[in-house]
Image: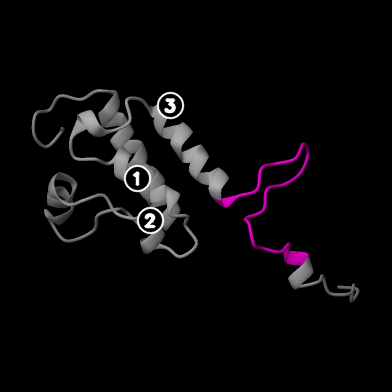
Amino acid sequence: ERFTTGRVGPQTDGYSLAWLLCAGLTGRPPFEGDAGEPKRAHMLSPAPRPSIMRRGVGRAFDDVIAWGMAKQRSTRFASAGELARAASEAVSEVYEPLAVGAAAAPLGTRPFQAVYPNPEDTGF
């Protein structure tokens, strides 16, 4: 909207939040390139798929990013709260629910200490 009509609203904020979520999940901006390439991508390219951009990101995030970064404002999440709920559900598909007082661990992983035990105290 900033590049075309200049009209912004909650869905524009949702687009920005989806952009940040994608960048946080993948470690890089959703659209990269020289000069005007990112601007064209924001206007014309489909939303990126974080599960392809970075190994280990759940496919459920692909849908969250696709809805949040949809080109038509009317097809995006209506609010940042909706985007947050969808992202929370995507996390729940990848991580086991927390027990009270327990730390979350990704499904199918082992605690670090189980794989690499702490070395014996060497007096250093």
Vertical position of residue 72 compared to residue 121: above or below: above
Name the residue beneath numbered marker 1.
65
User: Neighbour class for label 3 at 10 Å: few (<14), some, many (≥20)?
Assistant: few
Residue 64 is drawn in which quadrant?
top left
Between the residue at mark 2 and the residue at mark 3, the CA separation in whole angstroms equals: 21 Å
Precedes in sequence: disc 2 or disc 3: 2
Q: Amino acid at mark 3?
A: Gly
Q: Which residue is mark 3?
A: 81
| Neighbour tally class for label 2: few under 14, some 14-19, many 20 plus, Cα within 10 Å | many
Q: Quadrant of residue 7?
A: top left
The quarter in which the C terminus is drawn is bottom right
Q: Are marks 2 and 1 in contact (CB under 8 Å)?
A: yes
Does the magenta segment cover residue 96?
Answer: yes
Q: Nearer the viewer, residue 106 or 23?
A: 106
State the residue at coordinates (73%, 62%). 111
Mark number for residue 50?
2
Decide if residue 21 is on the left or right side of residue 73. Answer: right
Give the residue type at disc 2: Pro
Residue 2 vertical position relative to residue 64 in the rendered view, above or below: above
The percent position of residue 14, horizontal first and vertical second, equals 32, 32
Which residues make up the magenta segment?
94-113
Q: Nearer the viewer, residue 23 or 111?
A: 111
Q: Is residue 95 above or below residue 7?
A: below
Q: Position of residue 92 (x, y in %)?
A: 57, 44
Characterize the magenta stretch by its predominant secondary structure. Answer: loop
